[in-house]
């Protein structure tokens, strides 16, 4: 069952479907409101009853409007409600564990966010001869945030669905909001309470997003998952490894560093060898409506708001002011809540001093912010806990300690073996300023990703 509408428009459409063997055996509707809403809901089920479920996944509002002989712009909303209700019913169906379609050589599932990168990834998959099925994950819904700027909001789902259907692809939606909230958002809040600065995208990719899409690929009989990330996959004697993209400014391997080699065997990154300008040129050449669409720069659950406002709204306890101290413990000021500060931060400290001060540490237990001079930020030993290595640690020769930072030369203490580790120690060749606990350490051999872990502490 799926429903759409209600306040403020007053029209409400509910559609239920029963699927068997990849075919919609039965479809029913219930609608309240204007005559156009009832007509659109009726047309919607007429168009999908007895049809393959992938045909239903291609159905858009303009298909319903054509079936009705056309709708005025003011009445097209009824067709949008009806098709949205249908796709919400299908979303509930995709969430089932049962297999939907038999395996098909050449069929791929493509992650589509509604932006230019995922659209071109789907385009390249089709041009390579693949049967493309598009999927969008709904991860977050919050009336305070701006869903148009997020890649996984209800608004993004509708946008991605329209884009996929305009390209002729069936579109599926996976509702993972509960899992995302529990696994990613709650961890984000908890880490900030403890005075750490987490990276939720690494956690989402490694624990939520890709696992869910690959499980759906299995149920849809798809041989691979295709995404629009800027990353490459290379191989050594041990199999697949993530490698940095050709366009270093767009490289996303840091955010993907928790993906295991076994998952990489079933993932394709067709944009890894392209530059962003080439991707936009391809979109323009094929008249894709998103060719010049701006990119989202925010975390999906904070789109349109700030970290401070988000933490204040969602944290388990309210902000509490506390002491700003130096390394000797001398109180030199007051802060508005330790969650709003991160290691390396200079602006917004509100403390007068003869030299610039930086955040050296946030102490969640004592609700303190420790500050000091720039030289005090320099660290050469970084403890990581937990960590995973996909290859022997002796091969690690570089590490990235923040998403936008460049890799720095290093080695791992005691050359640990491949596998999971409770803790590892990184020995930096040169000191790095502003190593933040909670961030991800991404281990590299050249441009290849050999593992990752969470920064626990750093020392000089």
Image (tube, rainbow, N blue to C red):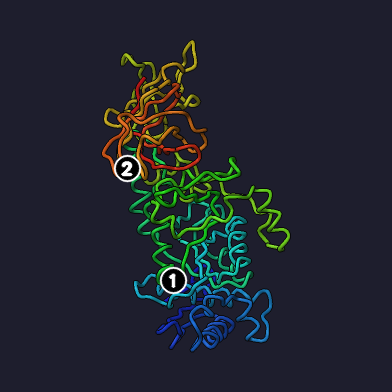
Label 2: how many residues lie within 10 Å, few (<14), some (14-19) or many (20+)? some
Residue drawn at x 55%, y 49% is 230
- Nearest the viewer among 407 and 84 is 407
Please report whichever mark, 2 or 1, sits nearer to the chain's N-terminal start. Answer: 1
The C terminus appears in which quarter of the rendering? Answer: top left
Does 198 sit above or below residue 377?
below
Which of discs 2 and 1 lies nearer the camera? The answer is 2
Alpha-carbon neighbours of circle 1 within 10 Å: few (<14), some, or many (≥20)? some
Q: Which residue is mark 1?
A: 91
Secondary structure at numbered mark 2: loop
The residue tagged 2 is 418
Return the residue found at the far top: 354
Residue 443 placement, left or right of 158: left
Q: Position of residue 264 (x, y in %)?
A: 44, 55
The quarter of the displayed image where residue 431 is located: top left
Residue 369 x, y percent position in the rendering = 36, 25
Q: Residue at x 42, y 24 (%)?
A: 359
The residue that appears at 36% across and 34% down in the rendered structure is 394
Q: Is residue 380 above or below residue 385?
A: above
């Amino acid at each position: 069952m799926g429903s759409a509408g209600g306040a403020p428009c007053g029209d409400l459409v509910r559609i239920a479907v029963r699927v068997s063997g990849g075919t919609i055996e039965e479809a029913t509707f219930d609608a309240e409101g204007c005559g156009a809403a009832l007509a659109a809901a009726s047309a919607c089920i007429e168009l999908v009853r007895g049809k393959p479920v992938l045909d239903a996944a291609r159905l858009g509002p303009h298909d319903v409007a054509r079936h009705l002989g056309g709708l005025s712009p003011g009445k097209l909303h009824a067709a949008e409600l009806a098709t949205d209700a249908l796709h919400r019913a299908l979303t509930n169906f995709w969430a089932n564990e049962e297999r939907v379609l038999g395996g098909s050589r050449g069929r791929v599932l493509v992650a589509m966010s509604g932006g230019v990168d995922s659209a071109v990834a789907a385009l390249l998959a089709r041009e390579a001869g693949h049967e493309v099925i598009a999927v969008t994950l709904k991860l977050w819904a919050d009336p305070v945030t701006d869903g148009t700027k997020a890649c996984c909001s209800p608004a993004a789902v509708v946008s991605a669905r329209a884009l996929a259907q305009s390209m002729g692809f069936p579109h599926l939606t996976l509702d993972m909001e509960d899992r995302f909230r529990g696994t990613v958002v709650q961890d984000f809040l908890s880490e900030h309470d403890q005075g750490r600065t987490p990276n939720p995208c690494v956690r989402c990719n490694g624990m939520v997003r890709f696992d869910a899409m690959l499980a759906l690929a299995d149920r849809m009989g798809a041989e691979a998952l295709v995404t629009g990330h800027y990353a490459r996959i290379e191989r050594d004697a041990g199999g697949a490894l993530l490698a940095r993209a050709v366009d270093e400014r767009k490289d996303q391997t840091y955010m993907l560093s928790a993906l295991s080699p076994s998952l990489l065997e079933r993932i394709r990154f067709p944009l890894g060898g392209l530059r962003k300008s080439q991707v936009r040129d391809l979109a323009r050449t094929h008249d894709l409506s998103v060719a010049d669409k701006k990119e989202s720069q925010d975390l999906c659950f904070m789109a349109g708001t700030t970290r401070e406002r988000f933490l204040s709204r969602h944290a388990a306890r309210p902000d509490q002011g506390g002491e700003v101290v130096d390394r000797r413990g001398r109180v030199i000021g007051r802060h508005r809540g330790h969650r709003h500060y991160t290691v390396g931060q200079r602006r917004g400290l509100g403390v007068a001093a003869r030299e610039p001060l930086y955040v050296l540490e946030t102490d969640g237990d004592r609700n303190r912010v420790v500050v000091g001079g720039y030289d005090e930020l320099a660290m050469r030993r970084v403890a990581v806990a937990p960590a995973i290595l996909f290859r022997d640690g002796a091969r690690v020769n570089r590490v990235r300690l923040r998403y936008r930072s460049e890799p720095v030369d290093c080695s791992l203490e005691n050359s640990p073996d491949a596998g999971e580790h409770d803790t590892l120690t990184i020995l930096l060749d040169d000191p790095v300023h502003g190593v933040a606990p909670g961030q991800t350490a991404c281990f590299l051999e050249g441009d290849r990703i050999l593992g990752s872990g969470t920064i626990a502490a750093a020392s000089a």
